[in-house]
Amino acid sequence: MSKTSSPKSTDAPAAHPATANTMWGGRFAGGVAEIMERINASIDIDRRFHAQDIAASQAHAAMLARQGIITPEDGAAIHEGLERVRQEIERGEFPFSTALEDIHMNVEARLTDLIGAPAGRLHTARSRNDQVATDFRLWVRDALDGLDLAIRDLQAALIDQAEAEADSVMPGYTHLQAAQPVTFGHHMLAYVEMLGRDRGRLADCRRRLNESPLGAAALAGSSFPIDREQTAAALGFDRPMANSLDAVSDRDFALEFLAGAAILAVHLSRFAEELVLWCSDGFRFVELSDAFTTGSSIMPQKKNPDAAELVRGKSGRVIGNLSALLIVLKGLPLTYGKDMQEDKEPVFDAVDTLALCLAATSGMVRDMKPRREALRRATAAGFLTATDLADWLVRVLGLPFREAHHITGALVARAEALGQGLADLPLAEMQAIEPRVTQDVYSVLSVDRSVASRTSLGGTAPERVRAAARAARERFL
């Protein structure tokens, strides 16, 4: 195929578009209503795509030149002009225009100012439909990489705490009722595992989104001899998307990201809720410094865990972003509808919110000081070693667990009536309920022995916690 000839030096440059109408062509003779311009424009949102949009345009222009669809000279001019546009944006000197609707038209218009007619050849064999789909995938891919680093940093902070507090006993809870003794380090490692699954979900999302829509054009592909494999490789995609209709209409990657983001936000919120509880007068398990707390405008004694409360509150925004995009997409036929312009803001907001919450949570984890004596004192209430007693009855006396459970319940009731802990209940009182109980039972009724006995894989024994922390470093960091 012959190359498209370059314009002669006497050719006038393409007219600078004054309104969005002139950019989409000659179909419309009338002007655009001001309110239409406002509702139609997305530049205030999608200007964040500028780096991805320019990179995709450079890859597209290089492919057009290599395939002989435009001349090498035009390809070089487009590449250099786009570099100048990139620099202007990065320096904050770029004149963004609402009249030009979106980042694509803003960049193309400025490119026309800089290099003239060759800029008009850039859009050969593509549409804004495949262009925005490509940009969006590139942006989400970059965002996923950044979030992965932030989650990893939070895991590192939690692992540090786990190692430092591997021996610090505290109550473990079910139904927010003291249940069995665990260690603070063990509790920290639970969140490390949760965050590891979050990273896995986001990595799966990245792997699935890493296909290139570029070259699908508006919806049906292109009649030009384009090389989609080349542009996909140039942009770091694994392959081109296989179906042009799917390529321009798919936003699964955005939904999948938001679903993973919502789960991550819930995990951060659960941890934040525990920090709020642990800082409260009813617990006093940890202390946060002034760096992550605030005071009251009227009560000078207050020290409020506001950073944790805000992390807890902001989870609602991320969850809402998932709901918003699901609702936008649920009734759309193939392929592209302008409704899809609403796909970016929830994703951008989720990324910004998570980045802030992850940084705040990492800061709080590194800042917080567990109050070991308070943690230990809390284990004295709630008969936390009752399960150890039941296990002893099964292991030593050979009782069925259900019978042991019943006997233990009776012993707990007796200790409660006497105002004593299980470890303080006299042997005679125990034998009045189960005559076969011996002095050996007291060997399992201390909190420290209970914790030390939980040596099963994933258990709370300090030796297990230290080993799990080492393994977590190898797996995640």
Image: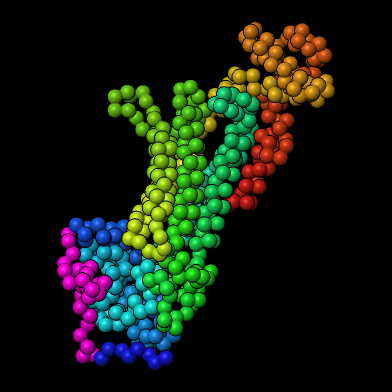
Task: Residue at 44%, 56% (x, y): give it.
Answer: 254
Above or below, comparing residue 255 to residue 269 in the picture: below
Relative side of 450 to 316, left or right: right
Report the span colored magenta: 9-34
Relative side of 388 to 277, left or right: right
Is 261 in the magenta?
A: no
Relative side of 181 to 317, left or right: right
Task: Residue at 49%, 37% (x, y): give it.
Answer: 270
Q: Measured from the top left, where is residue 165 in percent x and y?
A: 60, 35
Q: Measured from the top left, where is residue 439 in percent x and y?
A: 79, 15
Q: How many marks?
A: 0
- Residue 88 visible in the current orientation: no
The N terminus, quarter of image:
bottom left
Q: Measured from the top left, where is residue 184 in percent x and y?
A: 59, 33
Query: Most prominent secondary structure in the magenta stretch?
Result: loop
Above or below, comparing residue 202 to residue 267 in the picture: below
Q: Measured from the top left, where is residue 298 in percent x and y?
A: 29, 24
- Residue 41 visible in the current orientation: yes
Report the front residue among 371 and 360: 360
Above or below, comparing residue 121 to residue 191 in the picture: below
Task: Give the quadrant of residue 222.
Answer: bottom left
Above or below, comparing residue 173 to residue 431 in the picture: below
Report the front residue among 272 and 107: 107
